[in-house]
Image: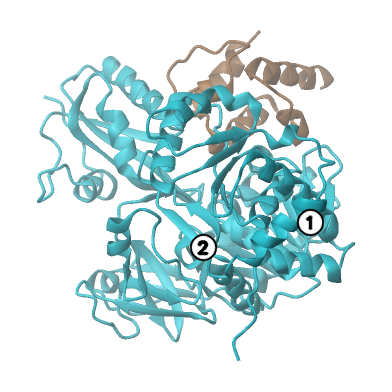
Chain colours: A cyan, B brown
Amino acid sequence: MSKKRELEWDRWVENAEKHPDKESIIHWTAGEEPFRWTFSSIIKAAESFAVGLKKKGVQRGDVCAIIIRHNKYFYPIYLGISSIGAIPSVLAYPNPRLHPEKFRQGLEGMSNRSGLDWVLTENVIADVIEPLMSKKGSTIRGMFFPLEWKKDLKFEGKDLENIEQIRANIKDTDPVLLQHSSGTTGIQKPVLLSHKAVLEHVTNYGKAINLNSDDKIVSWLPLYHDMGLIAAFHLPLAFGIPTVQIDTFEWVMVPSLLLEAISKERGTLTWLPNFAYNILANKVHDDELENLTFDSMRMFINCSEPVRAKSHKIFYKRFKEYGVKQESLSSCYAMAETTFAVTQTPPDKEAKILYVKKQSIAKGVIELNGNDENSRTCVSSGKTIDGCKVRIVDDKENDLPESYVGEIVISSVSLFDGYRNYPEKTAIALKDGWYYSGDYGFCLNGEYYVIGRKKDIIIVAGNNVYPEDVEDLVNHVEGVIPGRVVAFGEDDEDLGSEQISVVAETKISDEAEHKKLKLEIIKACMVYDFNIKKVYLVPPRWMIKSSAGKPSRKANRERLVDKREIIKWS
Amino acid sequence: MITEKFKKTILDELNLDDFDIQDETTADQVPGWDSLNHINVILAVEKAFDVHFKGIEVLKCKNIGDLQKLLNTKLDQK
């Protein structure tokens, strides 16, 4: 017998009917009383916004970009879009560092690729977006400011009938959301996910982490990122548990906010990129921890950048006296293309650590070692969750046995169908139902370890930065030889993440002029909000080229970072 | 008014040789002062002047002049 069609909206309504007064989203703002949505009140508010959207002409299947800062109405707006069969897509609100023109270019690239139909935003950035709409060939049909709408819009008479009719025709294989990978102009990859994919993921991932009705998620993660959107928003809403949402911008300024929210709200689960463990362990004062306890926490789940054993260690050491349990230090391997999680460590055990001979990794077959300078520490990302299969393959896509290092490829019941309007990228990543992640790793005793990347992406604090974007900006700086620039990630142990380094050839040899040029390079990258940690200036023809004739990121990185080669100016 | 020691503390933390910082200068205008470095700058100022800011006090600062004023208040209370 076939399973009844279920939309995410149906699940949200079911939760509201079962537990009308249970808290769903607790909206946190520093220094204010949190605003508390219940499962019934958020549905009611979502219906109001749905009426407003219908009146503005939004149709089933339309893509609605949401560019709104931390606001309690963000959530019902998102749900309201979904309730009429339109597709919400959360985009990052431009921060002050990002040049308005660059923001516009990014949005234009996204619009051309994803086919954005409507932009729901705030009046204060309307002038920046407006020119895009009148541009020839623009897909954007309109811009609204839903935070200014009257909140007493109600479903009645024909409105109700119309919307119910629309919902009756939506299939569970229809898209429920659209996410974008990181990157700037034109290279974001839009991922469409269906109701079915998301709901199946909630079931399978929920099982992997023993999700139960007493759980409460606490998160500062941005909702334009898959970890924030799926793990800390869709998962609790569909499962029927509360989630505490903290403003990302406030958290980076005041990291202790997360700890305060966990303690006051008695949180049980949180997802964090690796750098957050370092920030919390190293940058929070003792007096900010007064009267706080984290003994309610079942899992701190490390995800979205390589997991570092040292980060777990310093985090545990710092917070064990506040109730953090060693077994709560967990990890997960996830990506937008599979809705979210692929693997997860068990809920009641600390993520396993292996010491692997460095030389053996280079040879492609791992050998275990004692913890010494010849070993690399690898943290397990756990076993595959239900509904997912993982293979490790070589360059010719042949399967490799356990202990062999290769590319991680995944099939999942929650796998995307391909990048929207991007057949060339889809053809590279998706083959016969298997997603080629571009990540390198190995499997040992059924647990997966992610150890590197095939692509040159730099992961800074959980955000993917494409070196091409950085190089493009630096190429235009006066004094830099165009085409003779590379960008790469350099390890920052204190931060527990990577930072961006740039190597640029220049004919300038004067030291004082070098200082000026370095500053100009850093400033040039600020327009895209890239923070360059190190600039290496090198003389003409210093850089090693790849076989394609372009400066090689890998080879030049090795010279400067691994071999610490001294740059000579004659 | 931005004091020399306050300015130098910020520039040292951001590895900048020089950069013009006025009362109205905002963090996003200073090279290197991004969201990840913000907490480092605050900790460096706290260490240099032996003061402690509360998170909410820092959030209320709209520009570097506000941070200087906050610092002055803390120093007066010592």
Is A181 displayed left or right of A320 in the figure?
left
**Corner quadrant of residue A530:** top left
> In front: A374, or A255?
A255
Instruction: State the residue at coordinates (35%, 42%).
Output: A186
Marks 2 and 1, how far apart at CA:
22 Å
Q: Quadrant of the C terminus of chain A?
A: top left
Secondary element under disc 2, as helix, strand or loop, is strand
The chain holding disc 2 is A
Residue B1: percent from left, percent from top:
66, 7
Check chain identity for marks 2 and 1: say if they share one.
yes
Give above or below for A304 relative to A31: below
Give above or below for A233 relative to A472: below
* Residue identified by numbered label 2: A193
Q: Please, what is the three-letter code of the amino acid marked with disc 2? A: Leu
The numbered mark at residue A43 is 1
| Residue A388 visible somewhere in the drawing | yes
Query: What residue occupies the far bottom of the structure in this picture?
Result: A1
Q: Please, what is the three-letter code of the amino acid marked with disc 1? A: Ile
Dot 1 alpha-carbon crowd within 10 angstroms: few under 14, some 14 to 19, many 20 or more = many
Instruction: State the residue at coordinates (62%, 12%).
Output: B24
Secondary element under disc 1, as helix, strand or loop, is helix
The numbered mark at residue A314 is none
